[in-house]
Amino acid sequence: MTTDPFALFDAWYAEARASEINDSNAMALATADSAGRPAVRMVLLKGHGPDGFVFYTNQQSRKAGDIAANPQAALLFHWKSLRRQIRIEGPLTPVSDAQADAYFASRGRDSQLGAWASDQSRPLDARETFEARFAEVQARFEGRDVPRPPHWSGYRVTPLRIEFWQDRAHRLHERHLFTRTADGWDEGLLYP
């Protein structure tokens, strides 16, 4: 019987949430532009389940440009203290406006304001410029809710491959690979 990779993810993620000191939901997101040039950065997992793994970003950022040109991604969770990692690969799709609105509304006010003030990934002449823009946005939304900017939303990575890696002594690691099929998942082992 094949293991459910999402149940296994949930178990490992729960352990990480209980033991990791900072940002147990941090994951490396790798994308590539239209020329195939790769880029990787850390983002935060903000939702997950059998339909995929969700993160949010400025739609005018470099990562969003990569995604528009090449909607494939790889994710990596690395929990050093647990000596585990999970690799996920698959296509990216935008989340619904309703889902993006709901998540944006749950963010702290300064994070909401920052989404309006930042031209993410674009050159910045001085920190003071950003701080001045942040102050302008603070004044603009004083006393009222901060709506989600039209250029801010999320993406879902729908996994086609999920690999669970467990550190073992003498580099004799354990690797379980799940590959999506038309009927569910195939499970196998990989050499360390």
Image (cartoon, grey):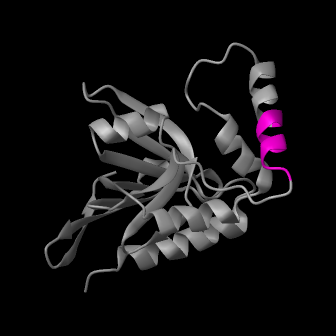
Q: Position of residue 23 (x, y in %)?
A: 68, 54
Classify 47 as above or below 43. below
Quarter of the figure with residue 13: bottom right
The residues colored magenta run: 135-142
Q: How many marks on residues? A: 0
Which of 63/102 is in front?
Answer: 102
Look at the image and tell me whether residue 122 can be seen.
yes
Report the side of 115 relative to 113 (left or right): left
- Residue in the picture at 29% in, 45% down: 71
Q: Residue furthest left?
A: 182
Q: Position of residue 66 (x, y in %)?
A: 36, 35
Report the side of 106 relative to 36 (left or right): right
Classify 1 as above or below 174. below
Check residue 141 for magenta coloring.
yes
Look at the image and tell me whether residue 167 can be seen.
no
Classify 152 as above or below 105. above
Which of 60/18 is in front?
Answer: 60
- Residue in the picture at 32% in, 40% down: 68
Classify 50 as above or below 147. below
Check residue 110 for magenta coloring.
no
Q: Position of residue 14 (x, y in %)?
A: 61, 73
Q: Residue furthest top?
A: 125
Main secondary structure found in the magenta portion: helix
Report the side of 55 relative to 38 (left or right): right
